[in-house]
Amino acid sequence: MPAGTLYIVATPIGNLEDITQRALRVLGEVDLVACEDTRRTRVLLNHFGIKTKTISYHEHNERERAAEICKLLAAGKNVALVSDAGTPLINDPGFRVANAAIELNLPVVPVPGPTAFVSALIASGLPSDQFFFAGFLPARANARRARLEELRTIPATLVFYEAPHRINATLKDALEVLGNRRAAVARELTKIHEEIARGSLAELAQRFGAGSPARGEMVLVVTGTLADKPSANQPGETGPSSQRLIERVGELEREGLDSKAALKKAARELGMKRAEAYRLLIAQKNRWNK
Ligand code: SAM
């Protein structure tokens, strides 16, 4: 008997109209739907008049469930794997089930659809040709800053999932570690209160400040160092990066830092190498002295 197929099916992240026709057909045709929370998925299935049987799998029983699901697949049953919302395996369980099936050479088929980080990225206004999806940052401040430090030199747009009660602390830490980069907070995507707040990290830290606690689900998108890369400037040329560098060095000097410390800090904030920042400053000074 041919083995059954494991379909990994994306479901809406808010707006039910985002379910795909293929997802509906697959969810209706399979023998079993494996869900994170059967009650939650049942609401979705009922909405579309789908009567397929469900079983639950979640972080704590995924290993055992993976073995059971693989047995069913090997016996020729087709199974759809869904998570509570969006794409399974994307910061959701499902990896163990999918991998167990792959290791047994059982067919695994993606049924693509909504996922919050892609929606946030495409509406953020930030470069989307290269991005790094970093999932959730650690909840503890020290670990969060250390992780941001690791990501600081990545020359691609950074995308994070974040909880509403931590967005303020995360924005402040991101500002401190990454510098005042362009960013966006995409909140309640595809839902009634959808909001995409765009601005600098400093502006967003103020917007989502401690005094105005944010609600709902959210994604933080931060421009990578690429957008500010000084090598975009030809030697001796003043581009946006050197302008920003000069302005920032001036601000820091006015705040009381000596010129060496100001250059070091500004270069770090703008994701530049210190030597490159120094070269840009000298080039500017030479122009002024002509
Ligand atoms: N598997 C999901 C996906 O494909 O996007 C992600 C699940 S993860 C447990 C939940 C996180 O995704 C939330 O904390 C939030 O950061 C983000 N998220 C999910 N739905 C969202 C929405 N409608 N608007 C903004 N962010 C959302």
Image: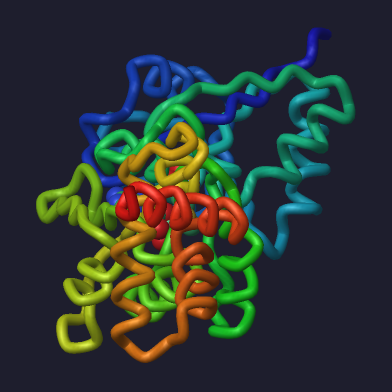
Instruction: Farthest residue to the left: give it.
Output: 192
**Residue in the image at 47% along x and 55% along y:** 282
**Residue in the image at 11% along x and 50% along y:** 192
Q: Residue 168 at what x, y percent from top left?
A: 32, 78
In this orientation, does residue 121 appear? yes
In this orientation, does residue 135 appear? no
State the quadrant of the N terminus. Answer: top right
Residue 190: quadrant of the picture: top left
Q: Residue 147 at what x, y percent from top left?
A: 62, 68
Asked whether 48 or 137 is in front, the reply is 137
The figure's colour scheme reads rainbow
Asked whether 210 or 113 is in front, the reply is 210
Asked whether 248 or 18 is in front, the reply is 248
Q: Residue 111 at what x, y percent from top left?
A: 51, 22
Total numbered circles: 0
Q: In this rendering, would 266 be left or right of 16? A: right
Q: In this rendering, would 148 be left or right of 168? A: right
Q: Is residue 159 above or below residue 69?
A: below
Q: Residue 137 at what x, y percent from top left?
A: 54, 67
Q: Is residue 236 above or below residue 256?
A: above
Instruction: Farthest residue to the front: give it.
Output: 290
**Residue in the image at 58% along x and 36% along y:** 81
Asked whether 232 or 164 is in front, the reply is 232
**Residue in the image at 63% along x and 78% along y:** 143
Residue 162: quadrant of the picture: bottom left
Instruction: Farthest residue to the right: give it.
Output: 104
